[in-house]
Structure formats: structure tokens, C-alpha cells
Image: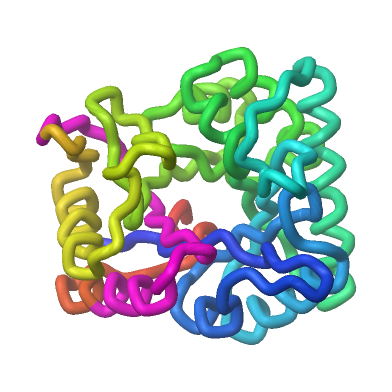
Amino acid sequence: MKVNLNSDLGESYGAWTMGDDAAMLAVVASANIACGFHGGDWVVMQNTVAEAIKNGVSIGAHPSYPDLQGFGRRPMTMSNKEVEALMAYQIGALIGVAATKGGTVTHVKPHGAINNKAATDKDLAAALARGIAGVSKDLIFLAPAGSAMVEAAAKANLPVAQEVFADRNYDDEGNLVPRGQPNAMVHDNDQALANVLRMVQERAIVSVNGKKIPCAVDSICVHGDSAGAVSMARHIRAGLEKAGVKVVTLPEMLA
């Protein structure tokens, strides 16, 4: 049994630091690197790419709405045409930066509000997929398990990896509990590991009310900006490996 472990990284900006990317890149197998629209800048992107390469971590773009002040977590209204261009712009930026360090971008994971909305909005999901496919049909679309983006990726002939979250809870529809609600986050390392093992072994999401929602589980995310993120990621990786689950990069997961 194998699974990918990923984290959203490169979200610092200028003199402002978010998370401990160097420590996280020594744990995870894939990095979703911010492309400057919710966090990250050209120097942060380049440094994160270099650290990912050093650790043998596969590189992905983490594009968002243009919302630095709101960290990409505020809803926005954009046309589908704008969304397609928005994806291509940010992916292209990371491809260029990665090339300066000899790295290759192999996947794309939308961030924050645009990801949350596209989980159920089929038109937006299709626009995201077209934007990614317009850059390269070899890019893996890292999408929330069971979301509209999974179907959109398939229709766009993109390879797709389905993602679940170690540090988030789910509602009965299989969507993330909104961050504003008190039970949205999972902070306890043992609880996060138990949730991850259950999802990987049973191939299903279990909601906060105990509802089991069958799905593919290709990748596990630990958010890099959460308190105690590195400790949680280490605990989860160790627990997965103890259970006989091999942690691999996204390209290796889909090979």
C-alpha cells in the first residue's frame, strides 16, 4: 500500500514568514508552492523549489485568487475566462522559477477559496482544469477527494490525484467543515493519524457525524501554516510507515 503526503508551502512573503518550510520538506513527499497571489514571492518560490529538490520532494503549483491580504481565503467573483488565465499565469511563473534550479513542476493544487468553491461548482472546476491543461496535459490535478474537480480533470484528460486532509474535519457531504466553525480543524496528532489511517485503509472519508463516504485516497495534506504542522506531519508519516504504508511522491503515486 502506498500514499502521497503533501503540504502547502512557500507561503512566506518578503520579510514575513509563514511556517517552517525547511523542516516540513524533510517530512513530506510533495510540496504545493504558492505562486505569489495569496503568499509567496519570486525569491520565496525559488528558495522553496531549491529546498524541495534537495529533499527529493515533487513540486506543485498552488495557485489562488489574487488575494494577498486575505491569504486567498476570501470568495471572489471572476469569469471562467479569467480563471483559466489566472491558473496559467501562476503555473507558468512557478515553472519558470523551478527551471532556474533544475526543477520540474509536476502537479497543481488550487488554494483556499477558489479550491473550496470549485469542490461543488462544476463550471469553476472545469475552468480550473482548462487552465491547467492549457499549460500541459501532463500536469497532475491534485483535487479534493470526490469533488467536482475530480470529474473536471478527467474530462480535460488530466491525470488526477484525490486528496484528503489530515488536519481538517469533513461534513456529511464530504466537504471540509468551514474554518469559521469550532470543529473545522484537527489539532491532536493522534487523532489526525487515526483519521488518516482510517481513510487510507478503508478508502473513505468519515464525517464529524460518523458518515462514511467512499472515495479514492491518493494524497494526504498537512497544512504548512497550521500550528504544530511539522510535528503532525512527522507523526503521520511515522504512523503510516509503521502500518506498512509507503509514502511516495505524486508522480510515483500515479505511476
Q: Is residue 146 left or right of residue 75?
A: left
Q: Can the viewer see residue 252?
A: no
Residue 25 magenta-highlighted: no
As drawn, 152 above or below 29: above
As drawn, 254 above or below 127: below
Q: In this view, does 172 lie to the left or right of 112?
A: left
Q: Residue 58 falls in which quadrant of the image?
A: bottom right
Tell me where the magenta segment starts and ends, as one range.
Answer: 210-238
Point out residue 188 in the picture as x, y percentages from the top left corner: 23, 65
Residue 236 magenta-highlighted: yes
Q: Residue 11 falls in which quadrant of the image?
A: bottom right
As drawn, 129 above or below 217: above
Q: Which residue lies furthest to the left in this view?
A: 210
Point out residue 1 in the picture as x, y percentages from the top left corner: 24, 61
At 21% from the left and 74% from the top, the residue drawn is 239
Which is more toward the observer, 246 or 7?
7
Q: Is residue 20 left or right of residue 239?
A: right
Which is more toward the observer, 108 or 64?
64
At 49% from the left and 27% from the top, the residue drawn is 119
At 68% from the left and 29% from the top, the residue drawn is 128
Point out residue 228 in the picture as x, y percentages from the top left corner: 39, 73
Point out residue 205 in the picture as x, y percentages from the top left corner: 23, 39
